Amino acid sequence: MKNRYLYSLILIFLLGGISPLLGQGFILQKDIIVERDEVQDNVVGLGGEILIKGTVTENAMAFGGTIILEGKVQGSIVGFGAEIRLKSSAEVDGDVISLGGSIEKENGSVIDGDTVQFGLESYADIQEFLKEGLGSVFGMKIIPLLLIIKLFALFIWFILAVLLAAVFPRPIVYASSQIRTQFWPVFGTGLLGIIIFTGLVIFSAFLSLILIGIPILIALVFLGIVIKIFGRVILFHLFGESLSKAFGSKNASVIGAVILGFILVSFIGFIPIFGSLFYFVLSILGWGSVIRTKFGTKNNIVRANKEVAV
C-alpha cells in the first residue's frame, strides 16, 4: 500500500510538470478495459485492474493493481508494485518490467523484448537488502548515512527513469538524437538556460521578502526540478543506446536503453570529484536538450506545421 502511494505521488508530480507532452494521448484512470477490437495509445492505471483484450500501440503501465494482457502491446508493459499476468494469447513487442511486483506468463505468451523483475516489494525488503547485502560488502553492520541517502536517491531516479521512458518514449528518443547531432548548440543552450534560471530564482527570492515573489519562486523551483529530471532521463537514453550499439545491439528498446544508461551514469557518479564534474556536465546537456526541443516535442510540432502547409 505504501509503495502504491509513493509511485502515485511521483506520477502526479511528473504529469503536473510535463503537461506539454500529454498531447500524445493516453488513458489514466483506476480500472481500464481495452476491448478485443479496440486500439489505444497508452494506458496508465492507479491501483485498479487493466484488462487488455485488444491492442495498445505504445505502453501499458500500472501503479499497484493488476495488468492482464490477452491481446497485444506494441510497446512495453511496466508495473510498479503491480501484478502482471500474460495470458496464452498475449503478445508484447517491447519489454516487460516489474518493480516490486510479480510477472506471471502462461505458455504461448510472446515477449519480443526483455523481461526485468525487481522483487523488493516492501520497505522491509529494502531494509533487509541494506543490512545483509551492503553490510557484508563493507564488512560492517552500520552503513554510512550518506551511502544510504545516495542509494535511496538512485532508487527514486530509477523509478522516474523507467516511468518517463514508458510514458514518453518518442520525445526522449528525439531529444537524445539532438544531443548527438547538435552537441555544442545543446551545451550552449543548457549553460545559458541555467545561468538565466539561477538569476530568476535569486530575483524571485528577493521579491519573496515582500510576498510577491513567493508564487513565482515556487513555480520556478518546480519547473527546474522537472527539467532536471526529464533532461537526465534523456541522457540515460543517450548513454544506454550508445553502450548498447557498442556491444552490437542495434534495436535496443527505449526502456532498455534508459536502464542501461542509468546503470552506467550511476556507476560514474560514484567516482570522487570526477563524478561530480560529470553530473555537472550532464545537467547542462539535460537543460539544453529540454529547452531546444521543448521536452522532445519540437520535432512533432515542426512536422505538423509542414503537413498543415501542404
Image (cartoon, rainbow, N blue to C red):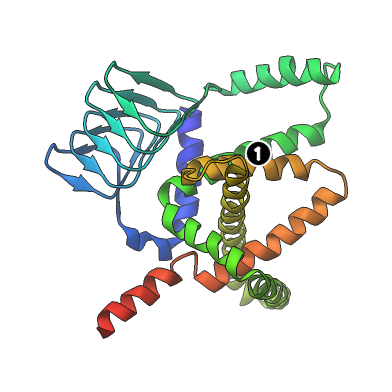
Q: Position of residue 301 (x, y in %)?
A: 38, 74
Give the camera-side residue of 88 and 224: 88
Q: Is residue 46 above or below residue 87?
A: below
- For the C terminus, the quadrant is bottom left
Count residues near mark 1 (Cα–Cα under 10 Å), then give few for <14, some for 14-19, many for 20+.
Answer: some
Q: Position of residue 299 (x, y in %)?
A: 43, 70
Amino acid at the residue labelled 1: Ile
Residue at 53% in and 41% down: 249
Residue at 45% in and 41% down: 8
Residue at 41% in and 49% down: 167
Asked which quadrant contains residue 292, the reply is bottom right
Asked which quadrant contains residue 109, the reply is top left
Q: Is residue 159 left or right of residue 141?
A: left
Q: Most extreme residue toward the left, as rendered?
A: 37
Q: Is residue 25 left or right of residue 302?
A: left
Residue at 66% in and 70% down: 190
Q: Position of residue 144 (x, y in %)?
A: 83, 29
Q: Is residue 280 left or right of residue 97?
A: right
- For the N terminus, the quadrant is top left
Q: Is residue 134 above or below residue 161?
A: above
Number of callouts in the render?
Answer: 1
Q: Most extreme residue toward the front, as rendered?
A: 248
Q: Is residue 36 visible?
A: yes
Residue that mark 1 sits on = 263
Q: Is residue 68 left or right of residue 147?
A: left
